[in-house]
C-alpha cells in the first residue's frame, strides 16, 4: 500500500564548534534494514530497557546519548519535539528521520532546563538505496475518479490531525513485538512506479497472513483513531507516548474501540483485504515525531 510521506523538519548545516556524528553509508535494498559494520550507533539499551536500532538514513532512527540530568531534558529535531528516554543517570533522544530527509547534516537540539541554553548535536544523514518496482497496469487501477479523489482529500486532512497527536507520557518500552506472524511481503521504502508515474515510498512493513489472523498491539497504547479509509481500508492508530505512534491497515474486523488502552499483546483487530489491496495482509507503520520510520528498527529480537 502506498501512503503519502510526511517529512520531518530538520536543522541546517553544522556550524563550527558543534559535535558531529557520522554513520557509514548503507548497502542497497534489504540490507538497508540492518546496521552496517563500522556504523556509528547509539546505545542498544539503558537501565529502562532496549532502544531501537540506530540508522542515520531517511526512514531511520537517530539514537542520541545526551547525558545525565536530574530531570528529563527536552530535545527537538527542527520544530518537532522528539522522544527522550532513560533516567537521571543517563538520557537518550530517539528521533525519527522521514523518508524525504535529504542526505546531509541534521541537528538535534537539547535543552536541560527551561532556563538553560540549547546545545546542538549534529548528525550526518547518509543516502539509503531502497528498492524500486516498475509495473504496467490498466489506467483504471491508478487513476482515481473525481469522487474518489474528493474522499481521499477529506480523509487525508483527518489523518493529518491524527498524526499530529502527541501525548507527553513516555512509552512503557521502545522494542516492539511483531503484531502478526507471517512473512514480510513488501519492504519499507519500496517505491512503486505505475505506468511511468512514481508513487510515494512504502511507509511501512507488509506482513502476509490469512484473513482473520489476530493482530496484537506491539506495545501498550491508546487507540486514537479507527476508520474505513479509501486507501488503507479498515484501520487503527495507536498512541504509545511521546510522539511514538503505530498504524494498522486493511483489517477485516476491529477488536478495539476509540479511546481504549491496549496492553502489549492485546488483539486490536484481524487481518483482511480492505481498501486498495489485492490480497489479505497487514500493513504496519511506525511513526516517530511525525516521521514514518522503518518498523524493523523497533522489533524486539
Image (cartoon, rainbow, N blue to C red):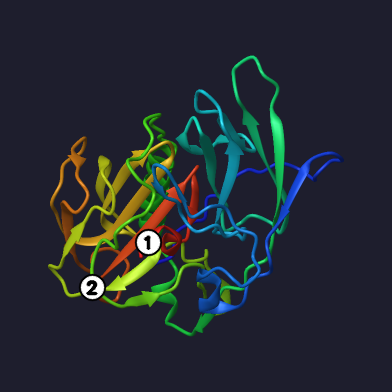
CB within 8 Å, label 2 to label 1: no
Q: Earlier in the sequence, mark 2 or mark 1?
A: 2
Q: Residue furthest right?
A: 16
| Position of residue 106 in the picture relative to residue 132 (left or right) | right
Q: Give the number of the mark in front: 2 or 1.
A: 1
Q: What crowding class fits label 2: few (fewer than 14 Cα within 10 Å), some (14-19), or many (20 or more)?
A: many
Q: Is residue 124 above or below residue 243?
A: below
| Position of residue 256 in the picture relative to residue 76 (left or right) | left
Q: Is residue 183 above or below residue 298?
A: below
Name the mark on residue 299. Answer: 1
Residue placed at 60% from the left, 58% from the top? 41
Whether residue 103 is visible = yes
Whether residue 194 is visible = no
Provide the secondary structure element on which disc 2 rests. Answer: loop
- Residue 187, image quadrant: bottom left
Q: Is residue 51 above or below residue 29?
A: above
For the C terminus, which image quadrant?
bottom left
Task: Using the numbered discs, state the Cα–Cα distance from disc 2 to disc 1 in whole angstroms.
Answer: 22 Å
Name the mark on residue 280. Answer: 2
For the N terminus, which image quadrant?
bottom left
**Residue 49 in the image, given as x and y percentages of width and height:** 38, 47
Residue placed at 51% from the left, 23% from the top? 70
Residue placed at 29% from the left, 59% from the top? 177
Q: Nearer the viewer, residue 14 or 20?
A: 20
Q: What crowding class fits label 1: few (fewer than 14 Cα within 10 Å), some (14-19), or many (20 or more)?
A: some
Q: Nearer the viewer, residue 7 or 92?
A: 92
Provide the secondary structure element on which disc 1 rests. Answer: loop
Q: Is residue 140 above or below residue 260?
A: below
Amino acid at each position: 500500500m502506498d501512503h503519502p510521506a510526511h517529512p520531518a523538519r530538520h536543522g541546517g548545516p553544522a556550524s563550527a564548534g558543534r559535535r558531529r556524528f557520522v554513520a557509514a553509508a548503507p548497502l542497497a535494498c534489504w540490507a538497508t534494514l540492518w546496521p552496517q559494520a563500522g556504523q556509528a550507533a547509539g546505545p542498544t539499551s539503558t537501565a529502562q530497557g532496549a532502544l531501537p536500532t540506530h540508522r542515520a538514513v531517511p526512514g531511520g532512527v537517530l539514537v542520541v546519548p545526551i547525558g545525565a540530568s536530574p530531570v528529563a531534558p527536552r530535545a527537538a529535531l527542527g520544530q518537532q519535539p522528539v522522544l527522550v528516554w532513560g533516567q537521571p543517570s543517563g538520557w537518550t533522544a530517539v528521533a525519527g528521520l522521514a523518508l524525504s530527509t535529504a542526505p546531509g547534516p541534521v541537528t538535534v537540539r537539547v535543552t536541560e532546563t527551561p532556563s538553560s541554553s540549547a546545545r546542538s548535536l549534529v548528525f550526518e544523514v547518509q543516502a539509503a538505496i531502497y528498492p524500486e518496482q516498475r509495473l504496467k497496469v490498466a489506467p483504471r487501477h491508478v487513476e482515481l475518479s473525481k469522487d474518489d479523489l474528493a474522499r481521499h482529500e477529506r480523509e487525508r486532512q483527518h489523518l493529518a490531525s491524527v498524526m499530529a497527536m502527541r501525548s507527553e507520557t513516555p512509552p512503557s518500552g521502545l522494542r516492539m513485538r511483531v503484531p502478526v506472524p507471517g512473512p514480510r511481503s513488501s519492504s519499507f521504502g519500496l517505491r512503486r512506479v505505475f505506468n511511468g508515474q512514481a508513487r510515494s515510498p512504502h511507509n511501512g512493513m507488509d506482513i502476509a497472513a490469512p484473513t482473520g489472523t489476530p493482530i496484537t498491539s506491539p506495545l501498550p497504547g491508546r487507540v486514537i483513531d479507527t476508520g474505513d479509509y479509501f486507501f488503507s481500508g479498515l484501520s487503527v492508530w495507536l498512541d504509545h507516548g511521546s510522539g511514538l505512534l503505530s498504524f494498522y491497515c486493511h483489517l477485516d474486523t476491529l477488536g478495539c474501540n476509540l479511546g481504549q488502552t491496549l496492553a502489549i499483546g492485546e488483539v486490536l483487530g484481524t487481518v483482511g483485504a480492505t481498501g486498495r489491496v489485492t490480497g489479505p495482509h497487514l500493513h504496519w507503520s511506525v511513526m516517530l515525531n511525525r516521521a514514518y520510520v522503518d518498523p524493523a528498527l523497533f522489533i524486539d529480537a
